């Protein structure tokens, strides 16, 4: 995860919240992953990091949600391909790239 974040930092920046340098620190990444694991173990959340061979069968999930930016057409096509349906637009949901 740390390597992924570092390798994609510049590319993903236009679609992400503003992040200070500490966000990409190995210790910070490790802490976030541990928090994800803790919340999953308590049944509070399920964070899925997709890989080519990964399946989410048998998890008895009620709902899977994804967010994308309207101008990011590649993400929209991927979500459609995966079977996601558009439910609406959240105009003030996220702060991306400082706005």
Image (spheres, helix red, strand yellow):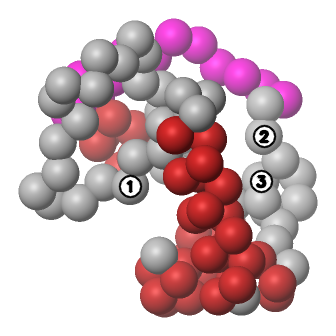
Instruction: Find out whether residue 96 is within the magenta segment.
Output: no
Percent position (x, y) of residue 10? 61, 83
Task: Give the spatial CA distance, label 1 vs label 2.
Answer: 20 Å
Q: Circle 1 — which element?
A: loop
Vertical placement of residue 87 versus 69, above or below? above
Q: Earlier in the sequence, mark 1 or mark 2?
A: 1
Q: What's the distance in space between the residues labelled 1 and 3, CA to CA?
A: 21 Å
Which numbered disc flags the more N-terminal residue, 1 or 3?
A: 1
Are the residues tagged 3 and 2 within 8 Å (C-beta)?
A: yes
Main secondary structure found in the magenta portion: loop
**Mark 3 residue crowding within 10 angstroms, few (<14) / some (14–19) / many (20+):** some
User: In x, y percent, where is residue 6?
Assistant: 56, 88
Real-space Cα distance between discs 3 and 2? 6 Å
Secondary structure found at label 3: loop
Q: Is residue 80 left or right of residue 67?
A: left
Left or right of residue 13, residue 63 in this image: left
Q: Is residue 86 magenta?
A: yes
The residue to which callout 1 is attached is 49
Label 3, on which residue?
96
Residue placed at 66% from the left, 55% from the top? 35
Q: Position of residue 18 (x, y in %)?
A: 83, 67
x, y percent for residue 94: 78, 40
The residue that mark 2 highlights is: 94
Estimate how packed mark 1 is, as few (under 14), some (14 to 19) or many (20 or more) residues with alpha carbons within 10 Å.
Answer: few
**Residue at x 29%, y 17% (from the top left corner):** 60
Residue drawn at x 88%, y 60% is: 98
Do we see residue 61 in this rendering? yes
Which of the two residues, 90 or 62, is positioned nearer the viewer here? 62
């Amino acid at each position: 995860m740390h390597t992924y974040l570092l390798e994609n930092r510049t590319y993903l920046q236009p679609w992400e919240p503003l992040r200070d340098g500490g966000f990409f620190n190995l210790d910070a990444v490790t802490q976030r992953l541990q928090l994800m694991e803790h919340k999953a173990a308590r049944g509070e959340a399920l964070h899925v990091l997709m890989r080519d061979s990964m399946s989410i069968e048998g998890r008895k999930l009620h709902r899977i949600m994804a967010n994308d930016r309207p101008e990011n057409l590649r993400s929209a096509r991927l979500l459609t391909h995966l079977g996601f349906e558009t439910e609406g637009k959240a105009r003030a949901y996220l702060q991306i790239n400082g706005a």
